Image (spheres, rainbow, N blue to C red):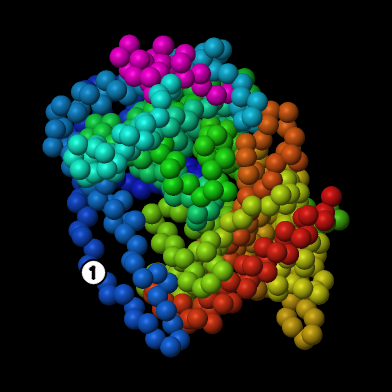
Amino acid sequence: MNWVRPIGLGYSTRALTSSAVRLGLQPQQIDDEEYVHSPQHIISPPRPPHQEQSPYNANTFPVDSDPSTSITLSKYHARDLLMAVSMNADTHRKKVAETVLEAMEELREMALLGAPLWINCPENSGMESLNRVEYLQNFCSTDATMEEIMKMVEVPSMTSLDGRNDELPNGGQQSQLPPLEQDDLKTEASRETGFVRMSPVNLVELLMDVMSAEFHIPTALVSSRECHFARYCKQLDCATWGVVDVSLEDFTFPLLRYKRKPSGCLIQETLNGGSKVTWVEHVQANNRSIHSIFEPIISSGFAFSAQRWVATLVRHCERISALTTATNPLSNDGGKSLPKEGRESLLKLAERLTRTFCVEVNASTENIWKPLCVKGAQDIKVMIKNSINIPGKPPITTIIFTTSLQLPSPPKRVFDFLRDEKSRSKWDLLSRDNTIEEVAHIITTSKNPENRVSIIQVDACRNRVATLYLQESFTDPTGSYIVYAPMDIRAMSMILNGGNADSVFVLPSGFAVLPDRAITANGKEEECGSLLTIAYHIVDDSCAENCVPRSSTQTMKRIIKTTANWIREAVAEKK
């Protein structure tokens, strides 16, 4: 059975190409109940050809004078990693096999043990956080334990030891000190338990489709965390499965920006056919270059916590349940029912809409964001997408522009304001002075009616044609999303009659709302502010591959700034 990766989990995956035999990612003997997910072929990617930078002229300017190299560097890292491991396949085969077995045992113990290994962290939304000293005593060697404890109590270096000090014997020349990236890695560890309406076997199949990943949050201002790992699965007893990740960088790269220590989940079958999932997220990350407004939720471990994994799995299963529900309201009065085929088509289109938004609005290496080169737009990023030679898509050029900002209002207030169709005219430039109503909706979760797929109609005025929007809004303890796209009446009618959702072209715009710090254990979300990401995806055929017309840059800045100001003012007044 094939499952689609859940929406909102915040990771992008790529298949690493290599032979499992050459990489040695499988133990010598694998039982039917044990699996190691590994790549299949190895291909060294060619160096991309040099592309000339678009010249300046009177009407256009390059989005950025320096071409982005993030994708190239990512490919080289993956290639070098695979080649380094493949060159010593015989040595690494046994080492990887031993490591995944040790990692599975560590994960099992960490998932089952309670205090003092895990402690409730009041400032971290009631999540369980790892007691580092207890972890070192139980899972690390004596030498490693002492080294880590020394780091925890280390005294900062004195000024006189600075390599730039003129009093040094070398005459003030900077000392050739080793890189400090490894020491800059900070440990983040959390645990979360939740119940998922899916069998353990299906959950295992869902989680095994990963080999290389970039973990990210919904903003273009925070770099993704890239990692290459082996994922190992084992049935621990008749009703329990374990899925654990082992970082491959341990074998070849001593200095990293991000590394996954044994992380994953224990899946226990419940009496109702569902699963109890205990997720352990244990990583080391370099958080030196983090945008200031996101620093609190990242340094606290909240942004990439185990809670996010469990919440996403729960929502994914609720979406599957919504597809199989017998009836759902077509109109707000509940007097009509949407045919099964129409409900499925609408939900599938909404899922693709939201999935595309999550894929596009992040700082993964696949997304080439450039700063909007206009005064007063420092945090506005822009990305040009071209579908001229892509089968199944219209030959057009589109542009995505986005920014993130901090609001003093709590996340729930911001989410309720943005998802409510009655508030749309207060922030949407195209809906000002128009009558707006939600003509139909499907609730996608049984517990929260705010999680819904809606059809919103903006009535015509001043001889203008009425506009329909498909919108999905959902919220969980880790964040909220409101994603929408305009649709013409003909396409919407086709979908409601059970037409093919894949044939409809949509450009998602919308919002992501995160708390500006970890929510406290007492649940008083109103005490924290919000981190709001705004993103628009529009058609703009005037854009060249790396150039945006000056008139367009001013328009994008005006749209972003106006929308942000209107939202800020509205949620400040809304009590």
Q: Magenta segment: does it hold 52? A: no
Residue that protrudes farthest toward the front in the picture: 167
Write the residue at 50% across / 54% down: 221
Closer to us: 546 or 452: 546
Residue drawn at (32%, 24%) of the image: 100
Main secondary structure of the magenta stretch: helix
Residue 267 visible? The answer is: no
> Which residue is identified by label 1?
50
The residue lying toward the viewer, choosing from 204 and 476, is 476
Q: Quadrant of residue 498?
A: bottom right
Give the residues drawn in magenta, as a range.
128-151
Q: Quadrant of the N terminus?
A: top left
- Above or below, 425 relative to 318: below
Place of residue 149 in the rendered image (x, y in percent of width and height, measured from the top left): 40, 18
The percent position of residue 545, horizontal first and vertical second, equals 39, 75
- For label 1, the SS is loop
Three-letter code, disc 1: His
How many numbered badges does the structure rendering display?
Answer: 1
Task: Give the percent coordinates (x, y) of residue 285.
Answer: 41, 36
Q: Is residue 148 magenta?
A: yes
Q: Position of residue 436 (x, y in %)?
A: 80, 68
**Residue depicted at 15% across the width and 26% down the height:** 91
